Amino acid sequence: MIIRILDEAQSDLREGAQFYEQQSNGLGLYFLDTLFSDIESLILYAGVHIKIDGYFRLLSKSFPFAVYYGLDGDTVNVYAVLDCRRNPNRTIEQLKKRRI
């Protein structure tokens, strides 16, 4: 299984890391380590998660973030990594912009 983190999802990860780094020194790096670990788990568990608006959704184990991904053969495409604390309507709009 190959995992591709698309540009928008990489931007989401940077934004999340910056937010947490402002909260506490080193927390941004911990956020990235944790989210990358969650994403790497898709090598084994891709496709078992609930589908939301056409995307599979993996909830992070340590942070209130969701990883939205799709499957294309043996490739996992990560489209978004979004904060679950935000307005759900914003999440829906973000996902529509990144349509599979």
Image (cartoon, rainbow, N blue to C red):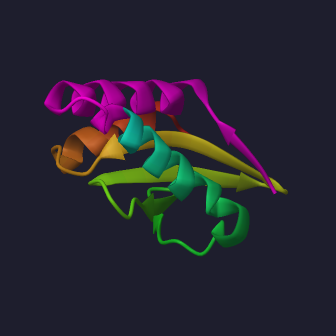
Name the quarter where the C terminus is drawn. top right
Of residue 21 and residue 26, the one placed in the foreground of this image is: 26
Image position, residue 29 (x, y; %): 40, 34
Q: From this viewpoint, which residue is outermost toward the bottom?
A: 48
Image position, residue 50 (x, y; %): 47, 72
Name the quarter where the N terminus is drawn. bottom right
Identity of the residue drawn at 49% across and 51% down: 68
Image position, residue 8 (x, y; %): 50, 27
Residue 25: quadrant of the picture: top left
Q: Main secondary structure of the magenta part?
A: helix
Q: From this viewpoint, which residue is outermost toward the front?
A: 25
Residue 100 is at least partly visible in this image: no
Relative vertical location of residue 97 with respect to residue 84 in this rendering, above or below: above
Image position, residue 57 (x, y; %): 46, 60
Q: Is residue 51 left or right of residue 30?
A: right
Q: Which residues are magenta?
A: 1-28
Of residue 29 and residue 40, the one placed in the foreground of this image is: 29
